[in-house]
Amino acid sequence: MNTLQFTTSIKRELWEYNKIFKWIPISLALLFICSPFLNYLLSDLSNGQWLIRFERISEMQNVEQFSQIVFGFISVLFLPFIIISGIVQLYYFIACLFDERRDQSILFWRSLPVSDAMNVGVKLLVGALILPVIFLAAATATFLVFLVFIFIGCIILSLGYDISLWALWTNSGFIGHIFTSWASLIPYTLWMFPIYAWLMLVSIFAKKAPFLWAILPVIIVLLVESFFVGYFNLNSRFFAEMLLEYFAISQNAIDVYTDKHTSITVVPFNVMKDKINVMALLIGAGFMYATYWLRVNKSQP
């Protein structure tokens, strides 16, 4: 594989979708950074309730509880970035192969010495990994900005009010929380791989309205199955239950790890790891091969 062709193809994708890959995470980070300060300025701080809360936290010195609070803060901070990243991923995978056929830019790209296999692989890599990495990087940068202000706040509390939170923050394990948030991207990507592959297949296949092509077959299958189950008085809905089981995260799945006294930090990683299904991965691989075949043989605009 030509490394220059590979990196150039990635840069091309980032350039084509520069607005959503760059400005959406930056805007989201700025929103999170500015909102607490706006809330601080608009709230009534004359009664000094915030100082009383810090005093209570300092007196308790409960490292385990404080670590859970920090984990909750990081989770709340990262979750919107992950959700928005997922929405952007859906848009990217639906549009990445459809747009180049619609505007006929595929004729130009196919004139370059880059294989169809590399083109399809790069689009999958960019959408499945690079895009969420950009959003995770924005979330991490946002947390680091908060960490700077937290550091300044700890200095002010320590020198001005004799309230020490250094030991709590030092032992809060926030670095581990950040690391596992990044590590969870691997099982999450494998879990969502069939969806990515299906959307790419629809993107290369649809002549128009790829979003409708992506959801209508699923809706039709669910409706037909519901009709047959009701008409023949069957006991179960196989397709609906299969989808629900694959995508739903039950409380029991979370309790399996929390009951084992596993660190709360690694619970999301373990839960998503358990959602990975070999059959689903094989189906996703089949969708990817069909996408490659259609690009080679049926991708004329």
Image: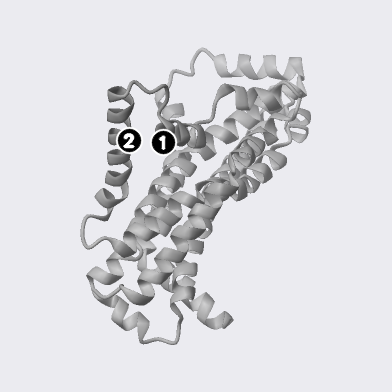
Residue 241 percent location from the top left of the image: 45, 30
Q: Amino acid at mark 2?
A: Leu
Q: Quadrant of residue 252?
A: top right
- Where does the C terminus fall, quadrant-wise? bottom left
Relative horizontal placement of residue 10, taking residue 42 as reference (left or right): right
Residue 75 percent location from the top left of the image: 57, 34
Q: Amino acid at mark 1?
A: Phe
- Does the image show residue 136? no
Residue at x-position 28% and y-position 66%:
99
- Does the image show residue 158? yes
Residue 56 percent location from the top left of the image: 68, 14
Is there CB contact under 8 Å for labels 1 and 2?
Answer: yes
Residue 132 percent location from the top left of the image: 51, 52
108 above or below 20? below
Q: Which residue is mark 1?
A: 239
Q: Secondary structure at mark 1?
A: helix
Q: CA distance from mark 1 to mark 2?
A: 7 Å
Residue at x-position 31% and y-position 24%:
232
Mark 1 surroundings: few (<14), some (14-19) or many (≥20) residues within 10 A: some
Residue at x-position 77% and y-position 20%:
61
212 above or below 205? above
Q: Which residue is mark 2?
A: 222
**Lower position in the chain sequence, tag 1 or tag 2:** 2
